[in-house]
Amino acid sequence: MKTDWLTQVIQHLERTGGTAVLDSRAVNSGDVFVALPGQNVDGRDFISQVLGQESVLVLAEGEAGRQNSGTGGEHSVVWVPELSRRLGQLAEALFAVNESNLSLLGVTGTNGKTSISHFLAQCLSAEAGRCGLIGTIGAGLWPQQQTTYNTTPDVLTNHRLLAQWAEMNVPYAAMEVSSHALVQGRVDGLRFRVAMFTQLTRDHLDFHGTMENYFAAKKQLFDPARSQAAVVCIDDRWGQELLNYRRDAIRVSGKVGAVANVAPTQVERHPQGLRISWTTPWGDGVTDTQLIGDFNVANLAVVIGTLGALGLSFERMAELLAQLTPVAGRMQPVLLKNGVLALVDYAHTPDALEKALQAARHHSTGRVHCVFGCGGERDRGKRPLMAAAAAARADQLWVTSDNPRSESFLQIVSDMLPGMPRDARYEVVADRAEAILMAVRDAVPGDVILIAGKGHETYQEIQGVKHHYSDLEAVQAAEERAQ
């Protein structure tokens, strides 16, 4: 049963041919502007600006019957109590996703979401023709993606994209589902064919407060009313705890000999990638991939569990996994002319940094260098943990900027240094490109340089301004300058 406000929105859009948007800057004639309070900006502050356009209806969070700030007629404001909690209802009504046409796959966890979603998009595009992808790097039909502001876009954008893909008969879509998205209702009203859990390590405690709250947010994706099947990596205590909630889950592991539905029996590391022997419910066998890093064993276990849940044989999975290409900014190799290997990676949590450095060590016959920093205006408690993780695994550290935002770089560094052992070899270099240049000049053949934290990003955010910057471009430029 549609409420009065929902009926009013639908009738308005049917009459004008517009759409519903949450960003005042994206409002066009005939649209519905959904004005909500936010963490940093209150959308209701832009109501008068939006009403200057023709035939715009505003749906705003507030007490019903509140004084209309519009001018009447087409220029009106509808006030709805707790509208933020009702956006899923609005999205479902406006953008009905045909679930018989499109199967939605959602992956959550601290690390691995981007790699897993991209691997699934590659496999399912090869298997079924097309696969949608929504996540950190962007949204679109694989391999084309447009940049999105958040890992998981707003609920209206998600429903709109998925409805479009379903209408186009795109059979699958893989989505990264962040903890923020689950708490803020950005996936409300969506139903997942398969929900996947990678693992949980410290991150976003500035938002969640505790690891228990962080886990509770992730757990929402596995509500049986929201996800039909579940694939859970059991390699940490949070995965084990999730099994108590979803006992029907496919259990996967990246550890050799683990008791799980999907697990490796042998892992061979080669310069060109990983060769892994597997045991699975869909057959046993070997996969060869171009991927670097033991953490990718766990990522592949989740992918195999998901493809199995979709009905693929192991033989077919092995064929698809052999074709995988690494994800941009995820252990992305750059072989320098002097024989030094640089790896560009998104690792920005202590656990991810430790695992990335461990992978770098496997490919080094000399020293391991690490260029890294910590983001501004984010969880300050993890800063010394990042320094400790880097010092434990690398021989030479270059502490530098990583999106300081409005925070002082020196303050960020002072928060990091308590985690640095007395005997750690490190340099503090504010300019990230300069830090990379120094690492390249210091490295000799056989060394590996891990450039961690930004991965695929093409900007450095300083004092509210995003300046163009790319670690990949910086290491390529450093090679030229170092000669």
Image (cartoon, helix red, strand yellow):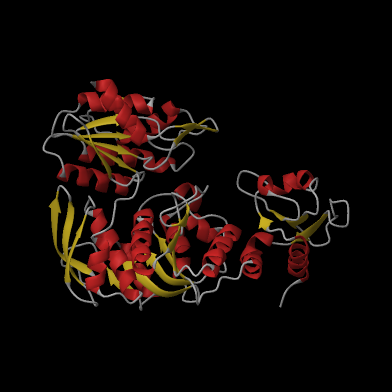
Q: Residue at x 28, y 57 (%)?
A: 324
Place residue 103 in its image quadrant.
bottom left
Is 462 positioned to the left or the right of 289 in the image?
right
* Above or below: residue 57 compared with residue 282: above
Is 421 positioned to the left or the right of 159 in the image?
left
Q: Residue at x 38, y 72 (%)?
A: 230
Place residue 340 in its image quadrant.
top left
Q: Residue at x 22, y 72 (%)?
A: 315
Percent coordinates x, y for residue 405 in the rendering? 50, 34
Q: Nearer the viewer, residue 428 or 163?
A: 163
Percent coordinates x, y for residue 244 in the rendering? 36, 74
**Tally of marks:** 0
Residue sitting farthest toward the left: 365
Percent coordinates x, y for residue 360 in the rendering? 20, 43
Q: Is residue 260 visible?
A: no
Place residue 196 in its image quadrant.
bottom left
* Above or below: residue 46 compared with residue 93: above
* Above or below: residue 27 compared with residue 415: below
Q: Nearer the viewer, residue 203 or 221?
A: 221
Percent coordinates x, y for residue 74 in the rendering? 84, 56
Q: Residue at x 37, y 50 (%)?
A: 202
Quarter of the picture holding the N terminus: bottom right
Q: Nearer the viewer, residue 414 or 347?
A: 347
Quarter of the picture holding the C terminus: top left
Q: Is residue 440 visible?
A: yes
Is 376 positioned to the left or the right of 19 in the image?
left
Is 104 positioned to the left or the right of 278 in the image?
right
